[in-house]
Image (tube, grey):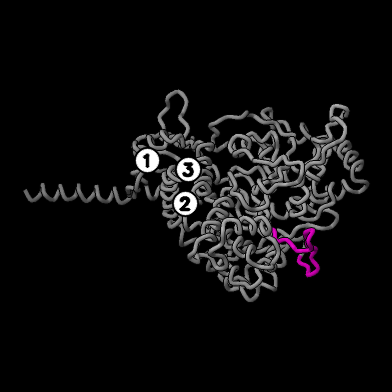
């Protein structure tokens, strides 16, 4: 009898050891009743394992148009996936802590402007393994050394400065070199603009900074360039190849049915199961970034939204420079959430902001329109009434056309736009890039990268450069003021002209023709930024859709004079 009891104890002990080794810890997450496997992450390709569960395919259209009731379900999945990533990262905490200890002395690992010396102890060294720790931080410009560790300024440190809107363009912005004689853009009223650009989706800090410098150089007109500061939006992807890696988690049947009924996930073809054995699914890291953006409006502690709110509050209540926010694609969701939350707090009788409280709705609209300019590139969000908006997009960007809500524009010929407080300036052109898909109601998340017409770095920003150059403008506020005027009416019927002159103007802005846009794309070397550099036959897209070098040079010189093509080429060579 004693021997049999000992045998049973040994068997039970072996089972406990086995369970502890596998590390399966299932928890119930509120509303969705989601079970998660805390310590399991799959970083390899979905096809690498025999028993690999299906990948959860989110419906991008429904995600972006979801109301708060639907976003609560998505928020729970995002928090579930985030806890899995944190659990996985804790296993390598020793290595990461050692790396940070070796670089704890910021002065020894990186260089920064001398103006940051008083704040040097508060700067945070950047590590790709801790990308989300820099969510909502301002990037510190790196020096010419490419080997140094980049750093960020936490928002609580930045907003402790007295003149942050002056400090950002002077010390935390893009420039061709560290120089005290930096050229800045000025508005038509003589006031400087503080330009802040949000990093693009899934980008690490180093890549985001390269993109900011490229945008600054592209927008250079006659020696004047905008000094652009970078607001970093962290990513769940730890490196450039990690955006395709998967996180394994478990969903209950009720969870999957809830997502299906709300049309938040796409059904698999041929009745394939949505989940594997025991309800296991794979979620892509880059989809987690999308979920975080979609849920930022209901996440009260999202640091990007909080930083944007404080920037807005600072600019509308001070005599410091106007604020310009540049965002693209899904990042416009953060801007929309920040504006909405600021308006709600600014009109509250209880002081919840450092500078604004008890304002009327009319005062809020007037302050936003006067002090805040928002430049969006292919926005995928409805933007609140208030700021001066400049929307830049491509006609063939089917994603922005089907997901973003229609933009209302006034048609008054007498210049009265009092009935249109959210009147935006919409600048559109046709991109040269082929589109593999047409308009549809159920876009997958992969659609964000399927068409380069949606890529701000290879068409939209160059189009904005041409608008500035052709109209002789030097600030974003000037673009808004000129573009929001009524387009002059011709005294001769348009049918008498061989060229549609009215179609090449927006308000008082002259818009570039297609051939000059194609020539400028060739000159600025957009091939390095393409999402899809090759077509389905592995042919080079740039060679197929852009004009030959000689023709592009002749076109640019015809419009803008000699040496202009070489000037534009220098932008690509320096990037």
Instruction: Provide the residue designation for mark 1.
Output: 251
In the rendered structure, does residue 453 fall within the stretch colored magenta?
Answer: no
Magenta portion: prevailing SS class: loop
2 sits left or right of 61 in the view:
left
Nearer to me, 85 or 347: 347
Q: Sequence order check: which comes first, mark 2 or mark 3?
A: 3
* Contact between labelled residues 1 and 3, with CB atoms less than 8 Å apart: no
What SS does tag 2 mark? loop
Q: Please, what secondary structure does the residue beneath circle 1 have? A: loop
User: Of 444 and 317, which appears nearest the observer?
Assistant: 317
Q: Which mark is residue 298?
A: 2
Residue range highlighted in magenta: 178-195
User: What's the CA distance linking mark 1 and mark 2?
Assistant: 22 Å
Reading the image, the residue beneath label 3 is 67
- Secondary structure under tag 3 reads loop
Residue 35 on image: x %, y %: 34, 44
Q: Quadrant of residue 343?
A: bottom right
Mark 2, Cα crowd under 10 Å, few <14 / some 14-19 / many 20+, is some
Q: Which residue is drawn at 57% across and 48% down?
A: 333
Q: Which one is in front in this view, the residue at disc 3 or the one at disc 1?
A: 3
| Side of 234 relative to 493 (left or right) | left
Tell me residue 62's x, y (percent): 50, 37
What is the C-alpha distance between the residues marked 2 and 3?
A: 10 Å
Neighbor class of circle 3 (other Cα within 10 Å; few <14, some 14-19, many 20+) is: few
């Amino acid at each position: 009898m004693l021997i049999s009891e000992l045998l049973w104890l040994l068997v039970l002990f072996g089972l406990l050891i086995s369970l502890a080794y596998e590390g399966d810890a299932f928890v119930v997450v509120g509303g969705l009743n989601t079970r998660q496997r805390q310590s399991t992450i799959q970083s390899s390709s979905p096809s690498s394992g025999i028993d690999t569960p299906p990948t959860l395919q989110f419906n991008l259209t429904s995600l972006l148009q979801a109301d708060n009731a639907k976003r609560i379900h998505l928020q729970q999945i995002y928090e579930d996936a985030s806890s899995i990533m944190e659990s996985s990262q804790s296993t390598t905490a020793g290595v990461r802590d050692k790396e940070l200890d070796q670089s704890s002395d910021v002065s020894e690992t990186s260089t920064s402007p001398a103006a940051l010396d008083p704040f040097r102890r508060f700067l945070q060294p950047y590590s790709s393994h801790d990308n989300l720790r820099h969510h909502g931080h301002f990037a510190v410009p790196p020096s010419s050394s490419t080997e140094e560790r980049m750093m960020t300024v936490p928002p609580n440190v930045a907003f402790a400065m007295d003149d942050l809107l002056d400090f950002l363009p002077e010390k935390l912005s893009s420039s061709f070199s560290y120089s005290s004689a930096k050229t800045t853009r000025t508005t038509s009223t003589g006031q400087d603009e503080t330009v802040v650009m949000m990093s693009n989706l899934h980008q690490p800090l180093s890549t985001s900074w390269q993109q900011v410098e490229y945008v600054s150089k592209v927008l250079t007109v006659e020696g004047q360039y905008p000094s652009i500061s970078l607001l970093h939006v962290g990513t769940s992807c730890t490196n450039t190849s990690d955006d395709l890696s998967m996180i394994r988690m478990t969903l209950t049947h009720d969870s999957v049915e809830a997502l299906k009924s709300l049309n938040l996930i796409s059904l698999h073809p041929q009745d394939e199961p949505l989940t594997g054995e025991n309800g296991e699914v794979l979620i892509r890291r880059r989809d987690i970034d999308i979920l975080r953006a979609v849920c930022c409006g209901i996440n009260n502690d999202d640091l990007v939204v909080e930083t944007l709110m404080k920037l807005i509050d600072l600019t509308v209540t001070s005599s410091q420079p106007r604020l310009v926010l540049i965002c693209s694609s899904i990042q416009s969701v953060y801007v929309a959430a920040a504006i909405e939350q600021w308006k709600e707090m600014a009109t509250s009788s209880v002081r919840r902001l450092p500078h604004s409280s008890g304002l009327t709705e009319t005062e809020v609209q007037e302050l936003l329109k006067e002090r805040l300019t928002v430049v969006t590139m292919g926005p995928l969000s409805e933007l609140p009434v208030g700021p001066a908006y400049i929307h830049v997009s491509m006609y063939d960007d089917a994603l922005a056309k089907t997901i973003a809500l229609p933009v209302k524009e006034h048609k008054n010929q007498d210049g009265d736009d009092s009935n249109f407080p959210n009147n935006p300036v919409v600048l559109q052109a046709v991109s040269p890039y082929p589109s593999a898909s047409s308009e549809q109601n159920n876009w997958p998340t992969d659609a964000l990268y399927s068409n380069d017409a949606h890529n701000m770095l290879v068409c939209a920003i160059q189009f904005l450069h041409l608008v500035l150059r052709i109209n002789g403008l030097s600030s974003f506020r000037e673009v808004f003021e000129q573009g929001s005027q009524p387009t002059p009416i011709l005294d001769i019927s348009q049918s008498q002209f061989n060229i549609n002159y009215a179609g090449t103007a927006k308000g008082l802005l002259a818009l570039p023709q297609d051939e000059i846009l194609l020539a400028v794309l060739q000159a600025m070397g957009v091939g390095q930024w393409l999402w899809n550099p090759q077509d389905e036959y592995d042919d080079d897209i740039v060679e197929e859709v852009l004009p030959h070098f000689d023709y592009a040079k002749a076109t640019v010189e015809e419009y803008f004079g000699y040496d202009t093509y070489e000037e534009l080429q220098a932008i690509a060579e320096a990037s």
